[in-house]
Amino acid sequence: MHEEKLQINTRIRILVFSLLPCLALSVALANTDTRSVDTEIIISASPKEVLQAFLSDDDLKAWWKVSRSLVEPKHGGVWSITWDDWGPEKTQHAWIGVIDEVTPDTLVIGHLVMIEPDMPLLGPMQLEISVSPTTGGTLLRLSHRGYRYGDHWDAMYDMVVKGWDHVLGDMAAWFQEEY
């Protein structure tokens, strides 16, 4: 089992680092006209616990229902999550990026690429998560930047606008069950 995980992690790293030169080129050629999805929610947990929920394999599986993840919680580390049976069609999806910043109150994932079935690669994007203490727990602010315009981009943007509120609601419910 351990050897199988190492093989999967190695394959994910190879994929991530093989995509980086393509991502750099796409940034240079891309239209700079982009959109972002911004949302916030109060979570009944400490800021440290909320940020950790984006970095821990066990937590990601519990609240976001990912199939597996590879996260190196350091500057330049890999942040990769996959779902094997996502959505009504039960298809595979992956989000792969590089951690640009990780502090006690901020996580920034850059060069984020979304790999979705029957779509071109979508990216590069940036995901920024910030946490701060507030009455009732933690204010989580999320900004998912870099959505361009066009058929595939528009479809994914529409899904993610609704999706982030749903997913963060799942996180809030999970924390209430856990604590």
Image: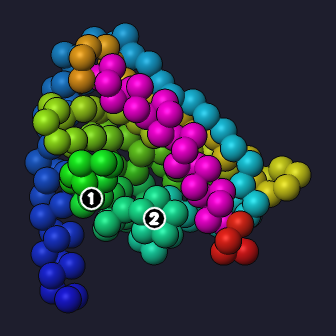
Classify the position of the C terminus by image quarter. bottom right
Horizontal side of residue 11 vs 50, given as left or right: left
Q: Quadrant of the rendered structure where residue 8 is?
A: bottom left
**Circle 2: residue type:** Leu
Q: Nearer the viewer, residue 94 or 146?
A: 94
Q: Residue at x 37, y 62 (%)?
A: 66
Horizontal side of residue 45 vs 170, given as left or right: right
Crowding near the residue tagged with mark 1, few <14, some 14–19, many ≥20 C-alpha atoms within 10 Å: some
Identify the element where label 1 is drawn.
strand
Up-down relation of residue 149 to residue 145 (above or below): above
Residue 129 visible in the current orientation: yes
Q: Residue at x 11, y 48 (%)?
A: 18
Q: Nearer the viewer, residue 96 or 62?
A: 62
Q: Nearer the viewer, residue 102 or 116?
A: 116
| Number of numbered markers | 2
Residue 106 visible in the current orientation: no
Q: Earlier in the sequence, mark 1 or mark 2?
A: 2
Q: Residue 111: percent from the left, percent from the top?
A: 31, 39
Report if residue 155 lies within the magenta region. Answer: yes
Numbered badge on residue 85:
1
Asked if the residue under mark 2 is in contact with the one under mark 1, i.e. CB atoms within 8 Å, the reply is no
Q: Residue 51: percent from the left, percent from the top?
A: 59, 58
The color scheme shown is rainbow
Identify the element where label 2 is drawn.
helix
Chain part drawn in magenta: 153-175
Q: Residue at x 42, y 63 (%)?
A: 65
Q: Which residue is mark 2?
A: 60
**Circle 1: residue type:** Asp
